[in-house]
Image (cartoon, rainbow, N blue to C red):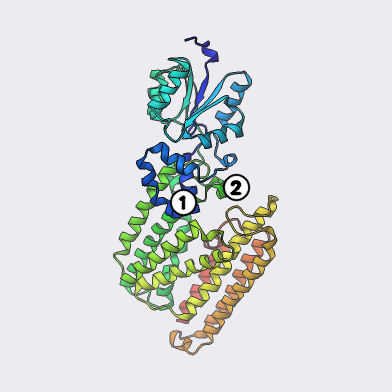
Amino acid sequence: MTFLPAANHPLCVDLDGTLIKTDLLIESAFALLRLNVLYLFLFPYWLFSGKAHLKHEIARRVDIDVSLLPYNSALVEYLTEQHSQGRPLILATASNQKFAHAVAQYLGLFDRVLASDEQTNLSGHRKRDQLLADYGDNGFAYAGNARIDLEIWSHADEGIIVDATSSVTQAAETLTRVSATFASTKLYSPLSRYLKAMRIHQWPKNVLVFVPLVAAHQFSDGDAVQAAIIAFFSFGLCASSVYLLNDLVDLPSDRAHPRKCNRPFACGEIPLIHGALIAPVLLIASFALALLLPPDYLLVLSLYYVATMAYSFRLKQAALIDIMLLGWLYTLRIIAGAAAEDIEPSFWLLAFSMFLFISLALVKRYTEVRTMIALGKTDIAGRGYRSSDLHLLSQFGSASSYMAILVLALYINSENISAMYQRPELIWILCPLMLYMITRIWLLAHRDEIDEDPVVFIMSDRRSQGLMLLGAILMWFAI
């Protein structure tokens, strides 16, 4: 066999984890589940016929927008330079050939594509054998990232290491001549990446489980407080589990969003497989804590999980239904707290929270639509709203917020208020406080000064914190 000079040896480039910071098998699997979650039960059946068959069956049912994939920009720049110098570039990947050809066509750099088909999973020794058959021992260069690539580097004349661990890098250096190493700049520390993916910053929402305790004036009951604390962590773990799955399912939409594109899974900061493994662990921990609480709490938590999964996989795309469901999910936290603390929530509390949280859910959608308008888009990726809906969302949200204040006013004027409070006249001051806070939220949304979940904004905003503290003081003196 005739070998090319070393400088002109074809450069074979791996795809998953090397050229892109993601795994197309996992990504396409979640894209398929987004279409129909029942496909999950077909995965083992397809896998029984081999991993190549599994990849083929998934690939023929879904498409991936390769323009949105998180490419390793430094490596792409290097490949562009090599391509301009006339060096042959080969995309050699275990991903299905449908996706591999789409990536190659999008980048316009590769002279050839070697990828998995329905019968052959081109990974590990199969990829090695294919490259040896085509280019001979030491007749090619190889760019990879994983330990499985070591058996290919051992036959390569030149190695390029991309985002590999230190142990893999050291092993590769003993097997081949390493000409280049690419290490991506991480946006977050290892721990903070996972905490960000779990959305720990969203956990303050779960203080809603303490609301029934406060509303019923049982904050001095040690058992009830303990139950509320357990419910807080149980709900947090359950919500984090859903957030992980939501981000795995919502990858295309997140990557098309100017802020969500920096989420750890969307930008490739965390391997997708880690999210798929951590989510069930968090869910199990959540329900393990739930077993320490009354059965009614377990029922409410189960209902919350089913509803959030339905939202993640389907209902978030249904205009208005998604808003109603988001508002109900917040209210469900209050119901869960009442179930954990063995307190019956009042009609007034549930009605007030439902109107309030529907308004805040509308703020969330309003800001998303406003952001898309600023980017010149007419539709929100993965949502059921258009740019023309902006003013209607504002009207719906404002009306719902004032309905919440009306419910609060009617409650204060009800017959049983005097039995609950010694100085009920102080409770009236809550109406203008709430009116100011919710109106200010909508004013800031119109000014494009809220760029996140409005509930999280309220929890972190100094003025809102001051208003909530003042409200708590008033209630204390009223009691």
Amino acid identity at mark 2: Ala
Local packing at callout 2 (Cα closer than 10 Å; few below 14, some 14-19, many 20+) is: some
Q: Residue 446 versus residue 137: which sits nearer the camera? A: 137
Q: Tell me: residue 142, above or below residue 394.
A: above
Q: Closer to the camera: disc 1 or disc 2? A: 1
In x, y percent, where is residue 334?
44, 71
In x, y percent, where is residue 223?
30, 71
Marks 1 and 2, the one that precedes in the sequence: 1
Q: Tell me: residue 47, above or below residue 296.
A: above
Q: Residue at x 60, y 49 (%)?
A: 257
Q: Residue at x 42, y 47 (%)?
A: 275
- Quote the CA–CA distance across marks 1 and 2: 20 Å
Secondary structure type for disc 2: loop
Q: Residue 16 versus residue 438: which sits nearer the camera? A: 16
In x, y percent, where is residue 202?
48, 58
User: Which quadrant would the C terminus be assigned to in this image?
Assistant: bottom left
Q: Residue at x 47, y 70 (%)?
A: 331
Q: Tell me: residue 220, above or below residue 322.
A: below
Give the number of the disc on residue 273: none
Q: Residue 400 versus residue 86: which sits nearer the camera? A: 86
Q: Residue furthest toward the bottom? A: 415
Secondary structure type for disc 1: helix
427 sits left or right of 366 in the view: left
Q: Residue 313 versus residue 447: which sits nearer the camera? A: 313
Local packing at callout 1 (Cα closer than 10 Å; few below 14, some 14-19, many 20+) is: some
**Cβ–Cβ under 8 Å for marks 1 and 2:** no
Mark 2 lies on residue:
256
Amino acid identity at mark 1: Leu
Mark 1 lies on residue:
33
Examine the rendering and report whether any part of residue 189 can be seen: no
Examine the rendering and report whether any part of residue 211 can be seen: yes
312 sits left or right of 434 in the view: left
